[in-house]
Image (cartoon, grey):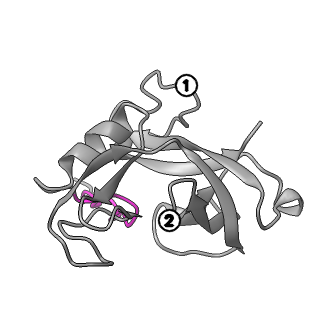
Amino acid sequence: MTPQRAAAPRFDLPEPDAFTRPYWDAAAEGRLLLRRCGGCGRAHHYPREFCPYCWSEDVGWERASGAATLYTWSVVHRNDLPPFGSRVPYVAAVVDLAEGPRMMTEVVECAHADLRIGMGLTVTFRGGSGGAGGRPGAEAEGGGEAVAVFRPRG
């Protein structure tokens, strides 16, 4: 009898909880959500139960437009954590969402030489238990929650 090999741990899968479940459910449907403060009016990302600017707990979910601009990026050529090693090279990036917040993400469907600070991007989603799940623009990579990534606008 051959010993069974344990599956390699995944380091790219979020762990939703009761608070973040609306965010992940929206992502599975191809929608990006933000939190907006009722006190100061500012939007923020990642989801928190309070406003990181004025500390108000009067915050709620809001659908983002999905539009962003590239703030900065790095092309990752080596990453030994599963499943990133099979994705290299990939573009780790920070984008400015149209609503104001900055978001860490990945840029896909773009030649590295074409990346430019300030270039227009639009959200798409990777993953989900059903892969692309029929969502327009979603990348098929099954398992876990759907995760927002960005591609060039156009």
Quadrant, the C terminus: top right
Number of residues whose C-alpha sits closer than 10 Å to that of mark 2, classed few (under 14), some (14–19) or many (20 or more): some
Q: Which mark is residue 136?
A: 1
Corner quadrant of residue 51? bottom left
Magenta span of residues: 3-15
Identify residue type, mark 2. Met
Q: Which residue is mark 2?
A: 103
**Residue 5 forms part of the magenta stretch:** yes
* x and y, in percent, of residue 149 in the image: 55, 51
Classified by dominant secondary structure, the portion drawn in magenta counts as loop
Q: Residue furthest right?
A: 113
- Horizontal relation, residue 132 to residue 120: left or right: left
**Residue 125 forms part of the magenta stretch:** no
Q: Nearer the viewer, residue 29 or 119?
A: 119
Identify residue type, mark 1. Pro
Q: Nearer the viewer, residue 53 or 122?
A: 53
Q: Which mark is residue 36?
A: none
Q: Nearer the viewer, residue 41 or 97?
A: 41
- Horizontal relation, residue 30 to residue 75: left or right: left
Query: On screen, 47 above or below 146?
Result: below
Q: Is residue 44 visible?
A: no
**Label 1 residue SS:** loop
Q: Is residue 21 visible?
A: yes
